[in-house]
Amino acid sequence: MQIDYKHIQAAHCENGVTTSLLKHIGVNQISEPLAFGIGSGLFFVYIPLLKINNGPAIAFRTMPGLIFKRTCASLGIPVIRKKFSSKENAEKALLACLKDGQPVGCQVGVYYLSYFPKEYRFHFNAHNLIVYGQEEDNYLISDPIMENVSTLTTYELERVRFAKGALAPRGQLYYPKEARVVTDEHVRKAIKTGIKRNVRDMLRIPGNIAGVRGIKYTGEKIKNWRDKLGLQKAGIYLAQLVRMQEEIGTGGGGFRFIYGAFLQEAHAYHPNDQLLEISKKFTKSGDLWRSAAVQAAGIYKGRLSSQADFNKMGDFLLEISDIEKDAFQDLSKIKWH
Amino acid sequence: MKKEEIPQDPSALGRHTKEVCYAVDSSGKYVTELSTGWEVKVTALDVAWQDIQLRLETAKQKVLKGEASPLLYFMELKLMDTAILSAYTGFWQWRIKRHLKPAIFQKLSPKALEKYAEVFEVSVENLKKMKANAD
């Protein structure tokens, strides 16, 4: 049983699943940057005290699940999302969808994901993939971050769908309920909504740990890491920051480049040249995130170790915070027609 | 990032798949390009695994010295904290913390030992002997 379905590779898994599922129902305008921007995917948060894999909890994107939810909602497409307490029911529901010709988005954990390289298999439960068919005991898998399609046995798929721990997927599956005609006018409106919401998330969340203030806060914290944590642990923390920023399918620069690409694509729907200028600011920000990563690598490789090196590292984030604040303020002032 | 600056360094992921990067071309337009990896993040991942190895070795020594039960070793091996192990075994976290004490681990019921062995993918005998499967 195989659905007529086209695998699309993306930088990030949820963007990719959203793009593929929407394209499958005929939303031809959609692309990874549009899905990301309409879903207001760009974010930053550093949650002190919470530890992930014995390192700091830092995210460069919005909560898992929101991009699909928001993008579909903004385009007027109803969504089905189900969780299961029973593994049998979870598989039955999946098979029923495949029989109906519906490719299905699944949230999975990566620790037991057999086609992933071992080095990448942590207990991270918010990965997304699409199941698009079944052949004998194998499910056909389209994992957006992979160049090619993969397969998982029934057992392997069940195991990753029922991974345990934080953000446990509980067999979660999701897909657009039905095809709807999406006009360019829908896309235009959705872009506007997506940008406004992203302005809110980056500029207006109270407190100092989220959005542009969160970036500044983290920069200030980093300057203390050398004294507070010691060189070795500070190195581990910085390595984790770099992994969150570059490794988890961010397209480079902690999703900032994807957002820059989104603003360029948005320009086709809203021919306001300011969007192109603001896009350049996100390119600048992404470049600075990359430079900060190089500086961090100097520290965790042991080449750099002085307080001045940590200050320089923290200052990168302060500069980034200013640039992104400026960029989002520009976006908040755009006159939409 | 400019398109020609996208790094193409060897990485663990690069052996399985190339990944999509976003960058601008000479006219300033965003395009995507595949990358085999970036040395900066390869070393970041190395740092994470070196830390795991260190924790594993520390755990092993603790078990050998009788300061912790073999559970600690297998938890580090499988990258699990008590919250994750609790979710996979169904045991309360406070019980797992008790089971980390060698004296209490010694007295565990066969059923509890089997549960742990199953989650850690070893035999009960190897669980007690702190012997991991080679893989």
Image (cartoon, rainbow, N blue to C red):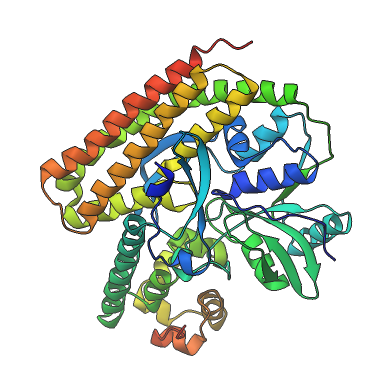
Q: Is residue A229 above or below residue B82?
A: above
Instruction: Identify the residue at image location x=32%, y=71%.
Output: B53
Please name whichever residue, A119 or A269, is drawn nearer the observer in this view of the structure: A269
Percent x, y for residue A301?
Answer: 22, 59
Which sits in the foreground, A273 or A27?
A273
* Number of numbered discs on residues: 0
In the foreground, A317 or B107 = A317
Left or right: A178 in relation to A161: right
Which quarter of the figure has residue A204? top left
Q: Which quarter of the rendering shows the N terminus of chain B?
A: top left
In which quadrant of the rendered view does residue A135 lie? bottom right
**Which residue does the image show at 40% across and 42% down from the upper left?**
B2
Q: Where is residue B87 shown, x and y percent of the image?
A: 55, 61
Q: Give the percent coordinates (x, y) of residue A172.
A: 69, 52
Q: Nearer the viewer, residue A212 or B3?
A: B3
Residue farthest along the front direction in this orientation: B26
Where residue B23 appears, as percent x and y from the top left, is: 46, 42
- Tell me which residue sits at (51%, 21%) in the image: A275
- Tell me if residue A82 can be seen: no
